[in-house]
Image (tube, helix red, strand yellow):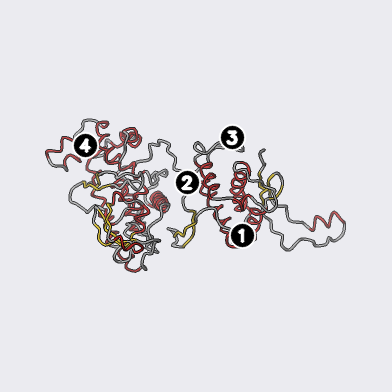
Amino acid sequence: MRYEVKVRQPLPALDLDVVSRALGEAALDVRPSAYVASPSITVDGRINPTTSYYLWSHCRSSPHLGTANRIASDLRHWVSFLVNERNYPPFIGDRDPVLMATEDDFAAFYRRCQYPESAAPSAGRDPGEGAMTSDSWRDVRSTAKRLYEHLDRYYQHPMPFEVAQVVHQSTGRRGTTIVGYRPRRRATGSRGTPIDPYFVQVLLQAALRVDAEGCQHLYLGADRDQAILALGVATGTRRNNLSNITKYEVPRCVSRDFTVMRVADFITKGDAGGDAFVFAHYLPAVWDYLEGRRAELTAQAGPYAPDQPLHIESADDVRVAYSDPAHREAGIQTRTWVMSDETFRRRLVDADGSSPVLFLNEYTAEPLSYDSLSNIIESARKFAATRIDPAFPQSFRLHDLRHTYAVHLLLAVYHGTIARNLPEHRRGDYTVDHLSAALELVKASLGHASEDSTKLYLATAHRFIGIPANEFVGAR
């Protein structure tokens, strides 16, 4: 049996003038003072009390029916999943399925919405219903969090998921988020939107909030944002690596066109990664932030206090030595950076009381959240298009830093720029006569196991062949 779960619109407010004209005399005002126009969730025509009362409470404090209807639509998905796919009975006494849900149910809901191909088959599933978009899931996840925070606050009902404190990148205000259950990143095989060296400079200028007239707009995170984008295009590192790299792993500035760094793919892929070429001319922006604004921020902020802290005793670009206050008997332990995952890195506390993670929130000096990087690239992209050059690609996204790195590196190999930076006995290994011959060399820097993955990044490289080789290494 499949239950029909719907959003019911509120009844219109009682119009006393209409009643009076119909009666031919003055009507009594019988409108209840507590009436609030709010949608409700129904199951086979019967109101679901938990979600409907939450919607009533929301509309009482924020009487905007359009927002309430969007929230109701999100809640409808959750209630329908519980009664139709998890088989919770909707009408047995006070056993509301919303109150009976567990984290196993929410995890199954996440798989159903984002990975339906891997979710267990269900007789209650609507066969025409596919996966939610990532944006839709983000809204549903946020609505579920607010619903259960309401139930926890007023009825001490436990939440069916873990909630953690976060700091909003744009405002510095603290908030909460559900731990895990991130929106799915679609593997579509996109060619992406790599940009040429000119537009890279436009993007870095936009991150600093410097417009076409040379005027800089006030923004506390400008130096950090420029450093993030510079390191992203210099190394092609994946987003999770970029958000968790430490200050110890940043390559030093060199006079050559290229240097190398060890990419800690253990963060993203569970392996130790490998060495990657780095475009050296982007590194000064990273070190300006590291030794400038970041140093000021950590000096002014209070001590970093993660859960279960690990204290750094010493560190270099290869490994970190640390002690665990909760297990002093273990003494000083060591771990290489390439074998250090996100959780470990965010537990570390430096000798000065700060986090060693490179990119910090501009208000709290805590490590930036994973999702903040998307906000940073979006803000820089909009500034670039509206205040510097309207031709800047509107489709550019964070992962396109990696596409840009791949294309620029391929052209650097093709033009012999990398070979000229190597000892003479190694130049032959990096000398090619056509683009496809450079794939294997670029594949290693991107950390790809398959050449097919690299080809997706490089499908647009032919558009950049006519650009002078020296522009890819910062010369004009």
Q: Is residue 181 left or right of residue 357?
A: right
Q: Which residue is mark 4?
A: 415
- Extreme residue toward the right, this view: 24
Q: Earlier in the sequence, mark 3 or mark 2?
A: 3
Q: Residue furthest left?
A: 424
Q: CA distance from mark 1 to mark 2?
A: 27 Å
Q: Nearer the viewer, residue 243 or 22?
A: 243
In front: label 1 or label 2 = 2
Looking at the image, which residue is at 42% across and 44% down? 394
Q: Report helix, strand or loop for mark 3.
A: loop
Q: Amino acid at mark 3?
A: Gly
Q: Is residue 215 something one can see in this rendering? A: no
Q: Which residue is mark 1?
A: 62
Q: Give above or below for 233 relative to 29.
A: above
For disc 4, the neighbor class at 10 Å (few under 14, some 14 to 19, many from 20) is: many
Sequence-wise, the earlier of marks 1 and 2 is 1
Query: How far is mark 4 from mark 3, CA to CA?
Result: 52 Å
Q: Which residue is mark 3?
A: 128
Q: Residues at badges 1 and 3 in contact (C-beta under 8 Å)?
A: no
Q: Amino acid at mark 4?
A: His
Contact (Cβ within 8 Å) of mark 4 with mark 2: no
